[in-house]
Image: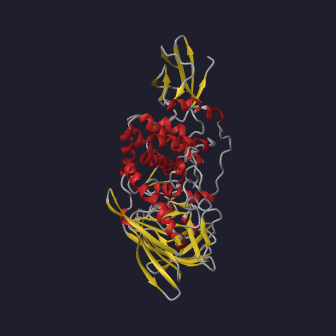
Amino acid sequence: MTSKFTQSILAGAFSFFLLLSNSAVAQYSRADSLRGRLGPERTWWDLKHYDLSVEINPSKKSIKGSNKISYQVVNEAKLLQLDLQEPLAITSITQGGNPLSYRREGAVYWVTLTKKQVPGALEELVVQYEGIPKEAVRPPWDGGITWQKDSKGHDFIASSNQGIGSSIWWPLKDHPADEVDSLDMHVTVPKGLLDISNGRLVEIKVGKDADTFHWKVVNPINDYGVNINVGDYAQFGEKYEGEKGTLDMDYFVLRENLEKAKVHFQDARRMMQAFEHWFGPYPFYEDGFKLVEVPYLGMEHQSSVTYGNGYQNGYRGRDLSGTGWGLKFDFIIIHEAGHEWFANNITYKDEADMWIHESFTNYSESLFLDYHYGKEAGQAYVRGTRMNILNDKPIIGDYGVNQRGSGDMYYKGGNLLNMLRQILQDDEKWRQILRGLNETFYHQTVTTAQVESYISKQMGMNLSKVFDQYLRDARIPILEYYQQDGALQYRWISAVKDFDMPVDVLVDGSTKRLQPKTSWQKLEGASVQVLVVDPDYYVGVSKSRE
């Protein structure tokens, strides 16, 4: 018996304490639907380019700006939906220099067009807006703008808005299904401060009292990945020779933290080595890679990943796996940068499918360990994170209402992916599947169905019931068994209808792959008093009295 199997004797114990969701059907408002749905007022036009200008006034905690929206007409229409959340307000909308009328409904602006919208034509809207944006209370989870000071008294400002939406601080089509193809940002900040945003710096326009920083993104970008970061920054960087050539990796930190960052940020290079190995080339070579210090924990803003973990390993100094392996790396650097592949390269079409971002990126933490410390280190880490799983409700949320599912999308989702690797039993093929996802869906928005179908096809097996069990059901399947007349009887319980996942177990001192179903199966000639399941399967085990 190997140590791996020895560890698994207690692996199923948690399954007897499942927290099953028994909440009433969620009730959603019209505002939820307007935020999350793809109605006709959003789908008749295809985003091409944003040219966003923002003036930041720290003393008033206010912003003022404009967004020139370029789009291609898909179908002829007269009504268009834009999004901007209160207390910000649009002050004018024009097309071809002509003012347009609009009506506000909460966070939505219904814009009436006067020019005929001809399918295939390229058009522009110019939107002016201003006000005091929502201040983030607990960023990045409770999004908005963070207004702080550094220890020297300089303004330290940042945006973070996943979930709540980019419309919390600028006007746009606030839905993940339609990524803009490219982006220009012009951010004006008081003299002496720097703005660090997505993409590459084109120029700095120096003014008397304020400077304007022009950033350009040439790749498609999801709207929640767009950010502003303002502070008294110092910069250093390096050239990384990666799979697509030379990548600029730049680091922007508060001036007072420069020396410690030069040492601590070596994890960024180690991250790039591991993730290019597992996931393929960094998806945004043209826009470079930046790690930017911010006054909150951090987030996955595309090509402008933010950092606030206090220059310490783990998650705020804690190991989320309880194994010790989580203290071998800075959680925020590894996790948030992992989102460059899963969230920014491959982006969900609906908030309900947020697991595509978080499950794969949670799993990336163990793959980082696998690359640098060996497979067992990564496996131990991902198994250790099970202590954080609640099994409270399905991982996939409700569609069309901007609703994510259970927070189990992180740790349970990571364990699901680790289990698929175990089922496949071919580590190189598994690596090619992960790389293939990033190549096949390069710079695309996707659905869960697409991801499930791709993995099933590449693994050569129908995994639909496995995905149903772990993504759409709160329960963990339990392998029930008993011994009778020299045979092992076994089946899945606490499972979705027709659940049929294979599982590796220890039988008579050797590993055996069983093919349980939800009806009893039999293995002749097997003597099993205590059935031990490979610990990389996130399942429960129960001995039946039958």
Question: In the depicted view, which residue is nearer to us: 524 or 162?
Answer: 524
Camera sees residue 249: yes
Image spot of residue 283 (x, y percent): 38, 58
Q: Is residue 161 above or below residue 208?
A: above
- In this orientation, which residue lies closer to the viewer: 61 or 121? 61
The number of numbered discs placed on residues in the rendered structure image is: 0
For the C terminus, the quadrant is: top right
Residue located 44% across and 34% down the image: 423
On screen, residue 221 above or below 374:
below
Q: Position of residue 376 (x, y in %)?
A: 47, 40
State left or right for residue 16 relative to residue 233.
right
The vertical placement of 418 against 483, above or below, is below
Residue at image x 64%, y 53%?
A: 28
Q: Position of residue 208 (x, y in %)?
A: 50, 89
Residue projecting furthest to the bottom: 208
Residue positioned most to the top: 485
> Hey, which quadrant is residue 520 in on the image?
top right
- Residue 495: x and y in percent read 57, 32
- Where, by quadrant of the figure, is residue 421 drawn? top left
Give the color scheme: rainbow, by chain, secondary structure or one colour. Answer: secondary structure
> Is residue 498 visible in this depiction of the protein?
no
Closer to the camera, 500 or 206? 206
